[in-house]
Amino acid sequence: MSLPQGEQVRAMSIWINGTGEGLCFKTHTLDYEHKCVEELPKWNFDGCSTFQSEGSNSDMYLMPAAMFWDPFCKDPPNKLVFCEVFKYNRKPIETNLRYTCRQIMDMAGNQHPWFGMEQEYGCMGTDGHPFGWPSNGFPGPQGPYYCGVGADRAYGRDTVEVQYWAYLYAGVKFARTNAEVMPAQREFQIGPCEDISMGDHLWVDCFISHHVCEDFEVIATFDPKPIPGNWNGAGCHTNFSTKAMREENGLKYIDEAIEKLSKRHQYHIYAYVPEGGLDNARHLTGFHEASNINNFSAGVANHGTSISIPWAAGQERRAYFED
């Protein structure tokens, strides 16, 4: 890392594989630093090895979408490049949901939608056992671990501290982090971001989390229920608002949005994962601070509902709501 780099620049291209959940990356060398994402060259990869094509026609193309500083290199010109995936005919692959998301965001641009994402994840050892848990048993019951401090309460702090600095260096719009309810469970929060930039920042944040964990031989798992039993699962809460919701009497528009969401509940559950939300069913049980996957509900400062309105929003009659 102390060797001089010269004029050339490293670019690490990141994309989502065909599962819709896994991340891949390739690193290549640029002759000079590109100042904006539009200047970056396109690249290709073998899609049959990432569940994105068949072997007889496997070339996929990476179209740069967002650019960040690379926290894994010493010199500042190096970049992380989040990419969309396109097929051989330069049309978006079916799993390229960023492409369809951008179309929707363009339609809603005049409403200036803001997003803040709270992503929970578990820290697991390479043996699949939660990091820091006794090898032949379980830690004490939940209660002292949320936002906890101390060797018997905060597991894997070194990993989190390194991740935090890497997020800030990269330029991800990183808001906060805390230990979660299950021991060895963490949460990071991104935003607020407007429009499609929310997804870009969230995915790059996930990539950095995985990359940092490699150095500690820890696996960051986003499984909604990594440990069965009386332990909290993991979710990704979405804080959302439009310009009208953030202005005076915005609570009226929040209530209208919640009413619309209530009529499309099963459709939205189906959209969360291709299997129709069956994966999330292990987490959305109605227990352990999670709503029931089959029933729509809403409330003020209630984390057991589908939609929660923060207490401050109810008092000020404007702000945002949390999915």
Image (cartoon, rainbow, N blue to C red):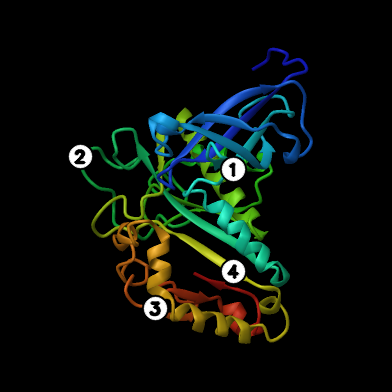
Q: Is residue 190 above or below residue 57?
A: below
Q: Are marks 2 and 4 in contact (CB under 8 Å)?
A: no
Side (left or right) of 110 relative to 124: right
Q: Are marks 3 and 4 in contact (CB under 8 Å)?
A: no
* Element assignment for label 1: helix
Q: CA distance from mark 1 to mark 3?
A: 35 Å
The residue carrying pointer 3 sits among few (fewer than 14), some (14 to 19) or many (20 or more) residues within 10 Å by Cα, namely: some
Judged by depth in the image, the label closer to the viewer, 1 or 3, is: 3
Query: What residue sits right under mark 2 in the picture?
Result: 136
Q: Is residue 91 above or below residue 228?
A: above
The residue carrying pointer 2 sits among few (fewer than 14), some (14 to 19) or many (20 or more) residues within 10 Å by Cα, namely: few
Residue at 43% across, 46% down: 21
Q: Which mark is residue 267?
A: none
Q: Is residue 8 above or below residue 188?
A: above
- Ranked by sequence position, the earlier of labels 3 and 4 is 4
Which amino acid is tagged 3? Phe
Query: What residue sits right under mark 3 in the picture?
Result: 296
- Ranked by sequence position, the earlier of labels 1 and 3 is 1
Query: What residue sits right under mark 1 in the picture?
Result: 164
- x and y percent of residue 42 in the render? 65, 33
Q: Which residue is at the far left?
A: 136
Query: What residue sits right under mark 4 in the picture?
Result: 240
Q: Are marks 1 and 2 in contact (CB under 8 Å)?
A: no
- x and y percent of residue 107 in the render? 66, 67
Residue at 56% across, 30% down: 44
